Image (tube, helix red, strand yellow):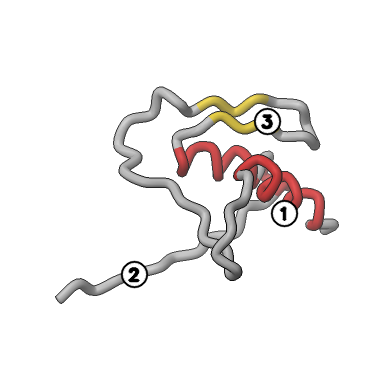
Amino acid sequence: MAIFHCTTKPIARSAGRSSVAAAAYRSGSELVDQRTGLIHDYTRRAGVESAEILMPDGGTADRSELWNAAEAAEKR
């Protein structure tokens, strides 16, 4: 029987981090941070087996739009 584990960690802007950059790294993709204009390209990263976005309605979402919206929603 498999035992699943989930861990969450805050991504602090004060430390110079970005949720868009973190999402690009974890998914092994290329995302553009609309707030800073930086391109985070991790397409050559090895070891990413699967990167999926699960939506409540069963639809699909664009990874770049999702994480840029999350970054824009945070005001602190």
Instruction: Find out whether the residues at labels 2 and 1 contact each other: C-beta distance under 8 Å.
Output: no
Regarding mark 2 in the picture, which secondary structure is present there? loop
Quadrant in which the N terminus is drawn: bottom left
Q: From the image, tell me which residue sits under label 3.
A: 32
Quadrant in which the C terminus is drawn: bottom right
Regarding mark 1 in the picture, which secondary structure is present there? helix
Judging depth in this view, the residue of 2 and 9 nearest the camera is 2
Amino acid at the residue labelled 2: His
Which sits earlier in the primary sequence, circle 2 or circle 3?
2
Judge the density around disc 1: few (<14), some (14-19), many (≥20) Cα neighbours within 10 Å.
few
**Outermost residue, left side:** 1
Judge the density around disc 3: few (<14), some (14-19), many (≥20) Cα neighbours within 10 Å.
some
Amino acid at the residue labelled 3: Val
**Outermost residue, right side:** 75
Regarding mark 3 in the picture, which secondary structure is present there? strand
Label 2, label 3: how far apart the Cα atoms are? 30 Å
Residue 74 placement (x, y as % from top left): 79, 57
State the mark number for residue 5. 2
Q: How many marks?
A: 3
Residue 15 placement (x, y as % from top left): 67, 44
The residue sitting at 72% across, 54% down in the picture is 70
Q: From the image, tell me which residue sits under label 1.
A: 70
Judging depth in this view, the residue of 63 and 68 nearest the camera is 63
Label 1, label 3: how far apart the Cα atoms are? 13 Å
Disc 2 or disc 3, which is closer to the eye? 3
For residue 57, side relative to residue 42 (left or right): right
Judge the density around disc 2: few (<14), some (14-19), many (≥20) Cα neighbours within 10 Å.
few
Amino acid at the residue labelled 1: Ala
Which sits earlier in the primary sequence, circle 1 or circle 3?
3
Residue 17 seen from this side: no
The residue sitting at 60% across, 68% down in the picture is 57
> Is 22 drawn above or below residue 41 in the view shown?
below
